[in-house]
Image (spheres, grey):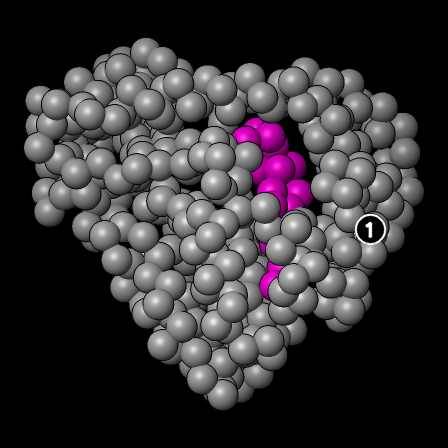
């Protein structure tokens, strides 16, 4: 066995609401706002599309999920050979890491970001460099300083999980102008649909100018299909072709394919979810609290504190399960009433 696997643990989900209720003697409802799921749920058209696919369950899926590929290609105005699907972005991150990172090659990302970049890089025995966040933002200059001849892969999570902060088009272009073209830069845009800032990057347009980049999107967050597991990469056909060698042949099920098509074709439903989220997120600005709340372009807020345990307990007592980090707490936005409770806790803390 690869020796590096012995130093890793399998992904640890938080305690279930039932276990937490017992542990903290909570009587009322508990709201799981720890995994950035979209509480409003997917388009109602998804369920219909899924039940239609049930008639074909005895058949293996078509290679490359061609109908979904066409729907995504139309949505972005790209070619079908630029799109690759993963069983969630989790699998896409695994595929990219496995393909690009050879022994001791360098992967550069941020210290406080999505954990799967590092997990997979360790498994590939890569040389990992994590640049600390700067005031809650990816430190793009710090990352540039770390890129050298050994560097193969750079991960930029934009907007970033868990900080919720983003970099705009101008900042991203200035960064890419300085990255050597033999280095692959992957933009993980799992929360892009939630970004309402007008200067949020148009990464698909940047693909023409910077052939060394690729963009990741998922149906798990704003499209509310986390339970189905569909994510995708959009990049150059050559990269897609190479990564496709590593993709497990039937990683997208027939049911998932039809569900995702229904979801992406219902942009009105997505728009409603994004607008509601934006309104709720705005209410966390200028909140009367001594806690530092990072500006967010996602469906969660990050609260910086050195009293993580105490804040987490205060939230739990009011029925809110958030996610703890070493320097703060990430809370997924829920329904308006839940968000109101969160703001009360933050204001009183
Ligand atoms: C949730 C998340 C993912 C994984 O999403 P799946 O498509 O559900 O696997 C990837 N990257 C970031 C930044 C995320 O927050």
Disc 1 designates what residue? 79
Instruction: Decide: is 32 above or below 160.
Output: above
Q: Report x, y in % for residue 271.
A: 58, 21
Q: Residue at x 10, y 43 (%)?
A: 307
Instruction: Decide: is 146 above or below 217.
Output: below
Q: Residue at x 86, y 52 (%)?
A: 63
Tell me where residue 287 sits by quadrant: top left
Q: Residue at x 35, y 67 (%)?
A: 141
Asked if residue 331 is among those painted magenta in the image, a careful observer would answer: no
Most foreground residue, 202 or 31: 202
Instruction: Decide: is 48 above or below 183.
Output: above
Region rendered in magenta:
213-231
Locate residue 336 relative to residue 247 in the image: left or right. left
Q: Report x, y in % for residue 73.
A: 79, 43
Locate residue 45 relative to residue 228 in the image: left or right. right
Per the picture, the main secondary structure of the magenta-coloured stretch is loop
Residue 230 shows in the view = yes
């Amino acid at each position: 066995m690869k020796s590096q696997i012995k130093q890793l643990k399998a992904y640890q989900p938080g305690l279930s609401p039932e276990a937490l209720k017992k542990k903290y003697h909570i009587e009322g409802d508990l709201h799981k706002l720890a995994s950035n799921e979209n509480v409003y749920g997917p388009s109602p058209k998804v369920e219909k599309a899924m039940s239609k696919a049930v008639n074909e369950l005895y058949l293996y899926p078509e290679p490359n999920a061609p109908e979904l590929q066409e729907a995504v290609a139309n949505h972005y105005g790209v070619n079908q050979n630029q799109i690759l699907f993963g069983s969630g972005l989790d699998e896409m991150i695994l595929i990219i890491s496995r393909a690009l990172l050879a022994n001791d090659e360098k992967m550069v990302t941020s210290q406080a970001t999505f954990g799967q970049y590092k997990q997979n890089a360790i498994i590939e025995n890569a040389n990992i460099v994590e640049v600390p966040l700067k005031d809650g933002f990816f430190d793009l200059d710090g990352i540039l300083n770390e890129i050298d001849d050994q560097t193969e892969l750079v991960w930029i999570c934009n907007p970033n999980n868990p900080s919720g902060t983003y970099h705009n088009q101008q900042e991203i272009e200035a960064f890419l102008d300085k990255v050597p073209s033999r280095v692959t830069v992957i933009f993980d845009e799992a929360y892009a649909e939630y970004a309402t800032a007008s200067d949020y990057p148009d990464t698909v347009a940047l693909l023409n100018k910077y052939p060394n980049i690729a963009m990741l999107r998922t149906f798990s967050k704003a499209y509310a299909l986390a339970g189905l597991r569909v994510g995708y990469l959009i990049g150059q056909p050559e990269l897609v072709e190479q990564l496709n060698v590593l993709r497990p042949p039937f990683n997208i099920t027939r049911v998932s394919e039809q569900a995702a098509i229904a979801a992406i074709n219902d942009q009105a439903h997505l728009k409603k979810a994004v607008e509601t989220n934006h309104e709720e997120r705005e209410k966390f600005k200028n909140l009367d609290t001594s806690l530092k709340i990072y500006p967010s372009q996602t469906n969660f807020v990050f609260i910086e504190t050195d009293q993580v345990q105490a804040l987490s307990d205060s939230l739990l007592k009011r029925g809110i399960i958030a996610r703890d980090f070493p320097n703060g707490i990430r809370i997924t936005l829920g329904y308006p009433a839940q968000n109101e409770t969160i703001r009360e806790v933050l204001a009183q803390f």
